[in-house]
Amino acid sequence: MNSAPSATAAPPSDVAGLISALGRGLPDGRLVVDPDVLAAISHDDAEWAPVGRAVAGVRARSEAEVRHVVRTCAEFGAPVVPRGAGTGLSGGANATDGCVVLDLSRMNQVLDIDPDNMTCVVQPGVVNNDLKAAVAERGLWYPPDPASAPWSTIGGNVATNAGGLCCLKYGVTRDYVLGLRVVAGAVPAAAGYGDPAPGAGVGYGDVVRLGRRTNKGVAGLDLTGLLVGAEGTLGVVTEVTLRLRPALAGTPRTVVGAFGGLVAAGEAVSLITRRGLSPSVLELLDRACLTAVEEWKHLGLEADAAALLLARVDTPGDSGAAEADALAAAMTEAGALWAAQSSDDAEAEALFDARRLAYPALERLGPVLTEDVCVPRAVVPVMLARIEEIAARRGVTIATIAHAGDGNLHPLLITPPGDDAARLAAQAAFTEFLDAAIELGGTVSGEHGIGLLKRDGMRRELDPGALAMQEAVRRALDPLGIFNPGKG
Ligand SMILES: Cc1cc2nc3c(=O)[nH]c(=O)nc-3n(C[C@H](O)[C@H](O)[C@H](O)COP(=O)(O)OP(=O)(O)OC[C@H]3O[C@@H](n4cnc5c(N)ncnc54)[C@H](O)[C@@H]3O)c2cc1C
């Protein structure tokens, strides 16, 4: 079985020629060669993921410019590293040596909102919250809500198949992507599989339209689904057609449970799942997160419990009230110190703000290495216990947030700035977390993607046959290996 890594482009030999050819096909202001600006767009938010040296950046404003960049990079054999907002937590948007960083954040137009069919068409650089606001004006809702929604782009969300808080009930990015336009690699005209009229071949820089606008559709293989979560390794997304939902009516109910420990909170998550309760959100945050946010933002939070579970119920009327009661009861039965429906909307909102702000609040304390394992929901308490044991044995400081209802846990490993021994201990704990998740039947990444940080973990997790198929797809769609090589 051949599971050799993909062909990846070496740095181009004619850098001056590449830069000059890029510049010839682009309007003024697009090409970036200033070393400081280039450095600023050469990495994402992942701590300690290696960053290579880009030879140029391009701030594209149109699909035609993206096509020019891809065609030129193919000609000169230069890697192309697509980039949205750079909020990724796996190094997916980090520069590789000799690459051109292709910044899509200025392709940020909402092209169409179709309320009759509940769809929209957007450029990849539209920021998630901006899209939410635009469709809300038409009575519609785009549910996927990564905690980075104020900054991260739809293109980045698509490329990482981003999850979020309400994805527990409403699904992840993939569930909303109907179609894509992609600037692709080279694919010869297909022949030999019994199709008398094979499609025309595709060359580097050509645009391929994938998917559909309809609610259902099964014509052809699901190439749209293949591109979602591909982390920019199969082409550059230049347009996205998304499914929308009607805006939610009414104010959701918030249920809060306080626990004496992480494991008890995990037990409540398992019980809620077992009982078939369906909150729209079920998040966990521990005392370290609450304290960090309070010291930064002064929201009036009291960090008196070791861990909180925050649940939201958006079912209206009496059924919603009954669901909220059932959630509080399950939390109490699982050992909560107290569990109650919040009667104070401002306080409930402050708790969700704390959940969203936990990562930047902790980053103020020192470098933060973010974990993203996801385990079957019945073993959430076991995994939380393993995380605590590993961190204690390695002497690593952690704070934990989690999309707990999905079994997606984010222990954040915090190290004092410049402390190499602490960094090494954190990296060792990180690896052990991955192994524990795999052992419990989970996955090394629930939503942040493989990027550079999880490549070994992914190889330990996936079936060797699946790895070989994955590499075969990459070779077929990007024979030069120029699309974000070495990632995913
Ligand atoms: C505070 C904070 C909270 C977060 N919370 C969540 C969360 O709740 N859920 C979650 O899933 N993630 C979360 N993240 C991680 C991150 O925000 C997501 O992975 C997000 O989808 C990245 O979007 P971006 O625009 O920043 O993409 P980038 O980081 O710029 O890129 C991410 C990947 O997508 C590729 N890419 C970007 N644009 C394109 C394109 N147009 N075509 C092809 N490939 C492309 C890049 O090459 C890279 O591999 C969080 C991050 C932070 C900092």
Image (cartoon, rainbow, N blue to C red):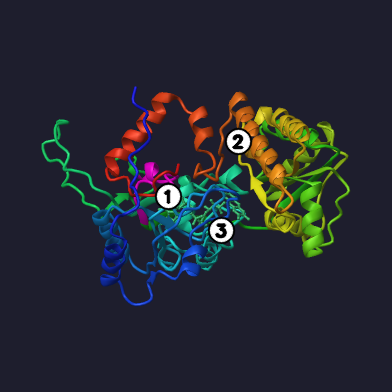
Residue 247 circle label: 3
- Whether residue 150 appears in this view of the structure is yes
Separation (CA) of disc 1 from disc 3? 18 Å
Q: Is residue 64 above or below residue 341?
A: below
Looking at the rendering, the stretch of residues picked out in magenta corresponds to: 224-237
Query: What amino acid is found at the position of numbered circle 2 in the picture?
Result: Cys
Q: Give the percent coordinates (x, y) of residue 82.
A: 41, 56
Task: State yes or no: discs 3 and 2 in contact (Cβ < 8 Å).
Answer: no
Task: Label 2: state its secondary structure.
Answer: loop
Separation (CA) of disc 3 from disc 2? 29 Å
Q: Earlier in the sequence, mark 1 or mark 3?
A: 1
Query: What amino acid is found at the position of numbered circle 3 in the picture?
Result: Ala
Judging by the rendered image, the residue that carries numbered circle 2 is 374
Q: Give the percent coordinates (x, y) of residue 328.
A: 79, 40
Furthest residue in direction left, as rendered: 196
Quadrant of the rendering where the C terminus is positioned: top left
Q: Is mark 2 within 8 Å of ligand 1?
A: no
- Is residue 80 within the magenta segment? no
Judging by the rendered image, the residue that carries numbered circle 1 is 177
Task: Label 1: state its secondary structure.
Answer: strand
- Front in this rendered view, residue 347 or 31: 31
- Front in this rendered view, residue 482 or 332: 482
Q: Is residue 141 left or right of residue 376?
A: left
